[in-house]
Image (tube, rainbow, N blue to C red):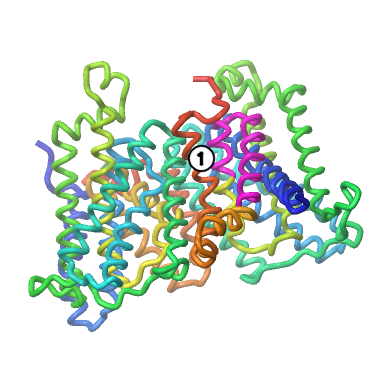
């Protein structure tokens, strides 16, 4: 029971991180109609920035904020230099172009930071355990991730639903030409949205940095998960991305920790432990396939045809 | 009448002559590596051609096409392991397995469109990827070494590099020829019509789902053949053959060469892999050049290399 609760919290944490990536992806797709395979690169870059700044200053919180700002800047520069020219093109052109960007960023990181991975040490006060219920402890840092991402999700909701910029973003998603015709600087808006999406991915990356090893290619695997999330949620829907992210995070984490035991009840010990990792990796793809077969437009389809 | 001697046809003719004479050059110069490299290029060009059939002509962007390479490869690998070295058994099984898999995957995926189709094909590819990882008996994550290539009695010796090269080249040309026949047939026209406007095609009475599914299965089967060839070429199969980045590579080849063009995938495969090979011999950090180069092709060469060639006036 204790383990189950802990795994649920881990799943929640993974889901919320995925939401950070998926929110950026789905915003960028919903508004600019751009398929951005290079989104995982911002995740990686955020983590590398955080690692460097922590090594330089020794202050994790300051480094995290600096890394967030730096990724925002990188995202906006990439938008101005490259992405801007891809709007209105075929989705396949986006796939090829941003695939090129992945290669570029991976190699750039190898050039700047070297091929070896980096580790980020946690400050003392985040490194311990925190009693969430009497007798139940949970790592403080993971709890902090959950709280920060929840705050960001709330901020995003307020930004998109309650502010003027959010109104423009929503309007841009519905009818781009009309917003431009009404005198809104659509180029600036796009640059901001792209930068925001990149920074959110960077935030996910820098928060994962102390848990995982910061390494080249760390963005690719999580990118696929983020795509799974926005597909299940319905492309362009932030609410859908939120729910799908939690679903994927929980199913993946809980599946990985309990499926081997369940399989062991059904099969002989040796074959169970051999196939369990493979089957638990399959779970979320199975989920996506089932969702798409039943609801070809995702759980929360956005209707703005 | 269209001119026969356009720059595009010239480039194509040079490329084909080059491919046909390559083993001769390799034998004279003693550079065996070239034959090995180009065998690989030709096999991947075949896979890319099959992807082009559904993606370029049918508008079905499969992001999981490498899965059939894996299935074809594993069919050969597993049969070799279990004591069936004959190519007359291995290859038909490879084709049947990929055909069957693409029938199931296609039937489920073709209900969706656009980005959803891209992602659901990816999902199925990932599922089968993890099946391969879980194949404990056949090496799991580490892959499976094939100790003898497919045997075709006295017909052809697949262990001879030159014979195998020409076998692959002949099969590639046959596949391109088949694609040409398909896209100009009534069947192919229906598929292409459904790409432009599926609703209208259905309104005038074509059950387009069946046409698209058949096209999807044909492409999957051809790609399974490419997989059987690749397994023979590398004498090794592993889940990495069907990793999603492999599927991405195939899409890149098609788009780079020219989508919806008969020879585009071949040009794209040659361009991408030769570029990789040359750049990586110049600098360790070759991807930093290749990446922006791909972006430039997207920005300034719509329709890929083939589209660029078609625009050049003689």
Q: Verify whether residue A229 appears in magenta.
A: yes
Residue B268 visible? The answer is: yes
Q: Verify whether residue A246 appears in magenta.
A: yes
Q: Residue at x 33, y 63 (%)?
A: B74
Q: Residue at x 21, y 78 (%)?
A: B26
Disc 1 is placed on an element classified as helix
Question: Residue A31, percent across and down?
Answer: 58, 29
A289 in relation to B238, above or below? above
A159 in relation to B200, above or below? below
Question: Residue B226, percent across and down?
Answer: 26, 58
State the extent of the magenta-drawn residues as a range: A226-255
Q: What predominant SS class does the magenta segment belong to?
A: helix
Instruction: Give left or right: position of A76 versus B83.
Output: right
**Which residue is more in the foreground, A88 or A305?**
A305
Q: How many marks?
A: 1
B129 in relation to B309, above or below? below
């Amino acid at each position: 029971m204790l383990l189950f609760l802990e795994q649920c919290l881990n799943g929640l944490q993974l889901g919320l991180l995925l939401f950070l990536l998926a929110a950026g992806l789905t915003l960028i797709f919903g508004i600019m109609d751009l398929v951005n395979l290079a989104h995982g690169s911002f995740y990686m870059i955020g983590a590398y920035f955080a690692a460097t700044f922590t090594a330089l200053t020794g202050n994790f919180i300051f480094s995290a904020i600096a890394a967030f700002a730096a990724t925002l800047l990188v995202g906006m520069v990439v938008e101005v230099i490259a992405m801007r020219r891809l709007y209105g093109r075929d989705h396949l052109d986006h796939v090829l172009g941003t695939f090129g960007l992945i290669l570029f960023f991976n190699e750039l990181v190898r050039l700047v930071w070297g091929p070896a991975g980096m580790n980020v040490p946690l400050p003392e006060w985040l490194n311990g355990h925190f009693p969430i219920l009497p007798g139940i402890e949970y790592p403080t840092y993971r709890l902090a991730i959950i709280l920060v991402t929840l705050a960001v999700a709330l901020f995003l909701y307020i930004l998109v639903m309650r502010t003027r910029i959010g109104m423009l973003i929503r309007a841009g998603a519905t009818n781009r030409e009309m917003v431009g015709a009404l005198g809104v600087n659509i180029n600036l808006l796009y640059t901001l949205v792209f930068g925001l999406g990149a920074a959110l991915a960077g935030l996910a990356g820098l928060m994962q940095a102390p848990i995982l090893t910061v390494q080249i290619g760390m963005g690719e695997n999580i990118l696929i998960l983020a795509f799974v999330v926005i597909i299940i949620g319905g492309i362009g829907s932030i609410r859908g991305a939120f729910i799908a992210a939690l679903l994927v995070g929980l199913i993946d984490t809980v599946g990985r920790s309990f499926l081997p035991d369940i399989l062991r009840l059904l099969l002989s010990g040796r074959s169970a432990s051999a196939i369990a990792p493979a089957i638990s990796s399959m779970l979320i793809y199975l989920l996506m396939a089932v969702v798409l077969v039943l609801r070809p437009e995702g759980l929360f389809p956005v209707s703005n045809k | 009448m269209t001119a026969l001697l356009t720059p595009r046809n010239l480039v194509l003719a040079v490329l084909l002559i080059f491919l046909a004479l390559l083993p001769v050059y390799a034998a004279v110069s003693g550079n065996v590596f070239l034959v090995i490299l180009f065998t690989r290029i030709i096999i991947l060009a075949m896979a890319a051609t099959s992807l082009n059939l559904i993606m370029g002509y049918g508008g079905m962007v499969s992001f999981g096409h490498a899965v059939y390479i894996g299935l074809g490869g594993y069919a050969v690998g597993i049969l070799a392991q279990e004591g069936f070295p004959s190519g007359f058994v291995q290859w038909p099984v490879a084709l049947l397995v990929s055909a069957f898999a693409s029938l199931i995957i296609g039937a489920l995926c073709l209900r969706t469109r656009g980005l959803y189709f891209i992602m659901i094909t990816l999902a199925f590819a990932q599922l089968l990827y993890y099946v391969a990882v879980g194949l404990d008996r056949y090496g799991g994550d580490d892959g499976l070494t094939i100790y003898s290539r497919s045997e075709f009695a006295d017909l052809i010796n697949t262990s001879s590099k030159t014979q195998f090269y020409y076998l692959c080249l002949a099969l590639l040309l046959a596949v391109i020829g088949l694609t040409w026949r398909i896209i100009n047939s009534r069947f192919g026209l229906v598929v292409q019509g459904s790409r432009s406007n599926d609703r209208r095609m259905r309104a005038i009475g074509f059950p387009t789902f069946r046409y698209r599914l058949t096209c999807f299965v044909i492409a999957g089967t051809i790609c399974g053949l490419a997989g059987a060839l690749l397994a023979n070429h590398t004498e090794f199969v592993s889940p990495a053959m069907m990793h999603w980045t492999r599927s991405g590579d195939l899409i890149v080849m098609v788009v780079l060469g020219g989508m919806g063009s008969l020879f585009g995938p071949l040009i794209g495969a040659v361009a991408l892999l030769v570029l990789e090979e040359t750049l990586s011999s110049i600098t360790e950090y070759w991807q930093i050049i290749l990446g922006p180069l791909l972006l430039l092709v997207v920005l300034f060469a719509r329709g890929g290399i083939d589209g660029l060639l078609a625009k050049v006036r003689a």
